[in-house]
Amino acid sequence: MAGSTIWFSLLLAAASARPATALWPWPHYIQSSDQRYAILPKNFDFQYHDGSAAQPGCSVLDQAFQRYRHLIFNTASDSLTARTGKQHMAEKNTLIVFVVTPGCNQLPSLESVENYTLTINDEQCFLLSETVWGALRGLETFSQLIWRSADGTFFINKTDIVDFPRFPHRGLLLDSSRHYLPLSSILDTLDVMAYNKFNVFHWHLVDDPSFPYESISFPELSRKGSYNPATHIYTVQDVKEVIEYARLRGIRVVPEFDTPGHTLSWGAGVPGLLTPCYSGSEPSGTFGPVNPILNSTYEFMSTFFLEISTVFPDFYLHLGGDEVDFSCWKSNPDVQAFMKKKGFGEDFKQLESFYIQKLLNIISLYGKGYMVWQEVFDNKVKLQSDTIIHVWREETPETYSKELELITQAGFRVLLSAPWYLNRITYGPDWKEVYLVEPLAFDGSPEQKARVIGGEACMWGEYVDNTNLVPRLWPRAGAIAERLWSNHRVTDLEFAFKRLTKFRCELVRRGVQAQPLGVGYCEQEFEQT
Ligand SMILES: *[C@@H]1O[C@H](CO)[C@@H](O)[C@H](O)[C@H]1NC(C)=O
Ligand SMILES: *[C@@H]1O[C@H](CO)[C@@H](O)[C@H](O)[C@H]1NC(C)=O
Ligand SMILES: *[C@@H]1O[C@H](CO)[C@@H](O)[C@H](O)[C@H]1NC(C)=O
């Protein structure tokens, strides 16, 4: 396209100028100039294009207007009374927001359009989008464009932005099983996700160590399987609060209930669900994965996932399917007999497939789509063509690229997480490595590349709880957010470092305990000009 050279020179111009603002993630097309307009907080309003400040039933934007007013001006109580346009500055009093297809009460989905354009010039201060979700992304960009001079005056420069996401699925995984995360810390994370234009919260709710989800159909699961059934659980009401809080920020909530492995915590609440392991000819008293040979297992899964399908409105459920340990199945004589009867020989992958297949059939009956970890594909489980495969195995770029190639060749859509395990930390600027990952760097046709729908940053919880979650996540997850949102040519580390450093200061100003990227300091009070 003809725009590419223009685009690139704009990028360089913005990089070499001393930008008073720093956008994160970087928009697809931006042109800005030194022409600036003052913004006086007490005069400033967000408005719909019909002139109203609120629209009946449009909670998504009504609330976003209030949030962004607070985010932009909250540290400015001093200047709310101060210094009105003494230099007769050109002033902007209103951001007009025009959403072509309002639809305010819906849920965001994988298909949601998040495009927007933002135009700030002598004539207008205008945000245009197809959907409310695009308007949310544009409001965030607008908030990042505003800067303050040394005397505390707010300014916005003449700017043109045309922006849209590179990938439709830009997720963050939190693990609330290894450590329980308080509801407030999940809600706070959703806020920061929205600042980064992330749009999927992958909630890895339960795992071996604890089962904090309070099921309506099987309350014993959390009563016996959580760390503390009074304090360390999420009620259905809590879950609904998370889903609505996320929706208001244009974020989908995809829950993961991983089976047949990673299910130790399920066992206490549902006797008979897990496979008894044997030591010789005697049960050893320990338990393995979900028992795939019993009808009662599938009866349980049918009821349980009917509830989950109802409580979580997103079209997709994440069904896990990773790291199934076969040793317990191997030790159990009933399982061995079942294998023989089915003609599986010694191939326990076939038994795993048998289980997953039955589970997927159940989920399909409920009209849901599913995501699974890559082993389900690797083990050749028969999958519906709309299944999304999640690549996680942390090997080398060569191995996960090969995996992307094979999955897309087989016609499936795919998500990348393998290089994005943020729970792993090293000394120094480790954001650079995750930043430079290129999800489409594998051999494949354009059709194959189009099947990569995005990726997810993962924050596994073995060494992470509410004390260190925030600084470990931010701004490091921002590097992945930009990779998934911005043009693939936005890879200049110096340009990224400058903007991410400023963005991190902005996060701190917004009350997020984001860790520093290196030596330096934040201008907490205002940006120097
Ligand atoms: C905004 O304009 C001011 C001068 O009015 C200039 O110093 C600054 O670099 C401009 N910022 C951007 C991002 O263009
Ligand atoms: C959103 O932007 C992308 C990239 O320019 C474009 O392909 C797509 O058609 C746009 N969608 C809408 C609804 O404007
Ligand atoms: C399990 O269900 C299958 C199919 O409905 C049936 O043929 C089989 O007898 C059942 N097994 C037991 C142990 O109830």
Image (tube, rainbow, N blue to C red):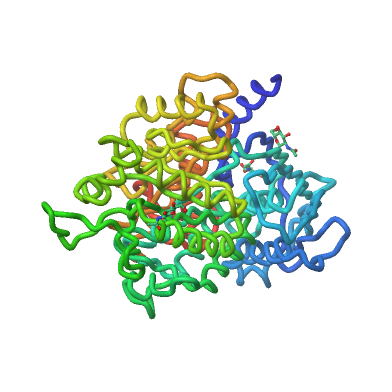
Q: Ligand 2 appears in which quadrant?
A: top right
- Image coordinates of residue 214 in percent, x first then y, are 45, 72
The one nearer the camera, 437 or 451, is 451
Q: In which quarter of the image is residue 237?
A: bottom right
- Image coordinates of residue 364 in percent, x first then y, are 57, 48
- Image coordinates of residue 487 in percent, x first then y, are 58, 32
Q: Quadrant of residue 6?
A: top right
354 over 524 or under it: above or below: above
512 over 146 or under it: above or below: below
The one nearer the camera, 360 or 94, is 360
Q: Can residue 83 be seen in this view?
A: no
Looking at the image, which residue is at 71% across and 47% down? 36
- Image coordinates of residue 241 in percent, x first then y, are 57, 69
344 to the left or right of 457 = left
The one nearer the camera, 184 or 443, is 443
Can you name the residue that lies furthest to the left here? Answer: 280
Looking at the image, which residue is at 60% across and 25% down? 8
